[in-house]
């Protein structure tokens, strides 16, 4: 089962010899609130059974109730899986060559944007809110030069450490690839 | 004008619509589970999406099994009697106006 725990963070568009420096998802607190919501939703059939169980069974709707509950859990599980899938597939990757923003906005809508790491001009971190301060998560804004788009890593854990790692990756890249991106591939 | 079309609708009336609607829901469910699994395995980076794909797959099978069991335990006769009993207990009379 080691394939489920050990990973090299490889991805489909990865270049040869390209190393992943950071793989970022939103902080776990962001997904915790929907998960609590789903857990509470899961108690609805149990609650109905507790409140009106005797009436339901005495009227001969026992089997219908259990079947309805099974259908409810079917829809619940689908919706839960979909929500977690969106969370897991929303990633930001910092490699030793590029910054990639990969967003899953639905089953059939996926947006992937990337910028060369040597085009990064400025990295800003922003921590706002009570929970963000306590749990140390926030936004990292990356401004790039020229026509390349800017990047916003939203609600990522430990933004200060991320900024430092990005800046380190940029200086490392510039030191070892003074010729630039095109000559590097 | 009356058209006498040589169409027999008896098979349509004899269809088990409950089984059919459950079949549609289950088919939709299987397709959605497949799409979620596909996305997690195809686009997931790192170990977390794969781990969740496994958990989601096991959960999907268990819930599917619960649905199959629930469907086979359905007793339409019992439900019909229950509804009949419920309807008979409802008082459909219009209450008399209470004018002083």
Image (cartoon, coloured by chain):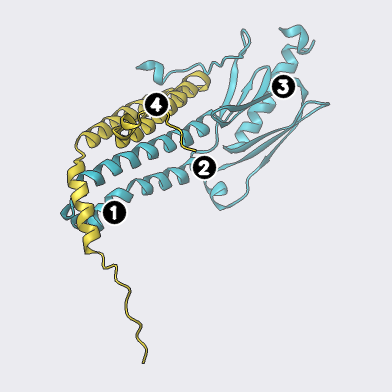
Q: Are marks 1 and 3 on the same chain?
A: yes
> What's the chain of the residue with tag 2?
A
Across and down, in percent, residue A14 comes to 61, 13
Chain B, colour shown: yellow
Of the 4 image quadrants, the one containing the N terminus of chain A is top left
> What's the chain of the residue with tag 3?
A
| SS class, disc 1 | helix
Mark 3 / mark 2, whichever is N-terminal: 2
Dot 1 and dot 3 residues touching (CB under 8 Å): no
Question: Callout 2: 10 Å neighbours few (<14), some, many (20+)?
Answer: some
Dot 4 and dot 2 residues touching (CB under 8 Å): no
Of the 4 image quadrants, the one containing the C terminus of chain A is top right
Query: Circle 3 sits on which residue?
Result: A117
Query: Circle 2 sits on which residue?
Result: A30
Across and down, in percent, residue A180 comes to 78, 13
Residue B48 in view, yes or no:
no
Residue A11 in view, yes or no:
yes
> What's the chain of the residue with tag 1?
A
């Amino acid at each position: 089962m080691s394939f489920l725990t050990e990973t090299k963070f490889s991805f489909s568009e990865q270049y040869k010899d390209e190393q992943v420096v950071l793989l970022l998802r939103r902080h776990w607190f962001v997904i915790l609130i929907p998960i609590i919501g789903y857990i509470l939703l899961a108690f609805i059939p149990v609650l109905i059974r507790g409140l009106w169980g005797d009436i339901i069974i005495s009227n001969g709707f026992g089997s219908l109730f259990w079947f309805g509950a099974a259908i409810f859990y079917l829809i619940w599980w689908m919706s839960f899986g979909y929500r977690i899938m969106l969370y897991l597939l929303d990633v930001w990757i910092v490699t030793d060559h590029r910054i990639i923003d990969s967003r899953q906005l639905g089953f059939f809508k996926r947006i992937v944007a990337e910028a060369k790491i040597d085009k990064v001009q400025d990295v800003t971190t922003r921590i706002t809110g009570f929970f963000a301060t306590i749990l140390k998560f926030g936004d990292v804004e990356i401004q790039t030069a020229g026509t390349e788009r800017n990047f916003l890593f939203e609600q990522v854990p430990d933004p200060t450490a991320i900024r430092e790692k990005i800046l380190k990756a940029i200086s490392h890249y510039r030191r070892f690839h003074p010729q630039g991106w095109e000559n590097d591939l | 004008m009356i058209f006498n079309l040589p169409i027999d609708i008896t098979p349509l009336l004899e269809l088990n619509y409950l089984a059919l609607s459950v079949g549609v829901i289950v088919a939709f469910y299987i397709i959605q589970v497949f799409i979620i699994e596909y996305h997690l395995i195809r686009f997931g980076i790192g170990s977390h999406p794969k781990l969740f794909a496994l958990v989601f797959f096991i959960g999907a099978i268990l819930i599917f099994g619960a649905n199959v069991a629930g469907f086979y335990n359905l007793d339409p006769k019992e439900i019909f009697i229950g509804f009949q009993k419920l309807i008979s207990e409802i008082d459909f009379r219009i209450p008399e106006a209470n004018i002083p």
